[in-house]
Amino acid sequence: MTPSTSSAITLNINGEKYLLPVDHRTTLLDALREHLDLTGSKKGCDQGQCGACTVLVDGRRALSCLQLAVAAEGRVITTIEGVADGDRLHPVQQAFLDLDGFQCGYCTPGQICSAIAVIEEHAAGWPSAATDDLRPDAGVPALGAEEIRERMSGNLCRCGAYVSIVQAVARAAEAAGSEDKEAVA
Ligand code: FES
Ligand code: FES
């Protein structure tokens, strides 16, 4: 008997459940764009090098062009279409808008999804390759331009909007930090 090459899977995306039949070779990116009409995630290189397809899987950034849709079943997937709170933009979206963190906008959904995770990773104390002092008691340095550039280095922008992107991520991180302080106070 020839093994089946497709399955019906259920994907949990932006709080909604989607049942869809997919070929086992379908990437998560193609499932989003071609099967579910969620075209915010972009296909730049289709080989894990540009970050345009970045989404959040269980809260962590993932390149959806490198992940099979069948492997995403049971995971919590958030795409750029799901980061806002109704009509209220996510603080990272708002910062990109306020500081012109884009030109053509093609890389922007991936940049924003990455930035959301970067801010959370930094707040959780994860070091990056730009972190000088890795001793356990050293703490993580502030999310300055160098840290942001390193942590966002998987997301390419062919328009070269990097200066504004870094400023937008810094602004959103600052806003998230003050919200945390207010929550603690
Ligand atoms: S399209 Fe996925 S990394 Fe470029
Ligand atoms: S804004 Fe055009 S590729 Fe980044």
Image (spheres, rainbow, N blue to C red):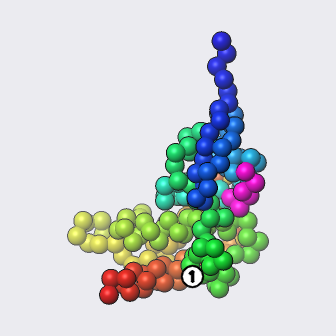
Front in this rendered view, residue 139 or 175: 175
Q: Identify the residue at image location x=55%, y=64%.
A: 114
Q: Is residue 42 above or below residue 158?
A: above
Inspect this view and state whether residue 73 appears: yes
Q: Residues within 10 Å of mark 1 (few under 14, many from 20)?
A: some
Front in this rendered view, residue 138 or 9: 9
Q: Identify the residue at image location x=49%, y=59%.
A: 59
| Residue type of the residue flagged with mark 1 | Gln
Front in this rendered view, residue 59 or 155: 59
| Chief SS of the magenta region | loop
Q: Is residue 94 above or below residue 36?
A: below
Front in this rendered view, residue 11 or 34: 11
Q: Identify the residue at image location x=29%, y=72%.
A: 139
Asked if residue 166 lies in the magenta stretch, the reply is no
Disc 1, SS:
helix
The residue carrying mark 1 has its beta carbon less than 8 Å from ligand 2? no
Find residue 44 and report its horizontal and vertical position in percent: 71, 55
Residue that protrudes farthest toward the left in the picture: 137
Find residue 63 and report its horizontal and vertical position in percent: 59, 52
180 relative to 86 in the view: left or right = left
Task: Identify the image quadrant of residue 79.
Answer: bottom right
Asked if residue 39 lies in the magenta stretch, the reply is yes
- The residue that disc 1 covers is 167
Q: Which residues are magenta?
A: 36-41
Find residue 25 and report its horizontal and vertical position in percent: 66, 35
Inspect this view and state whether residue 51 appears: no
Question: How many numbered tags mark residues here?
Answer: 1
11 relative to 34 in the view: left or right = left
Ligand 2 is found in which quarter of the picture?
A: bottom right
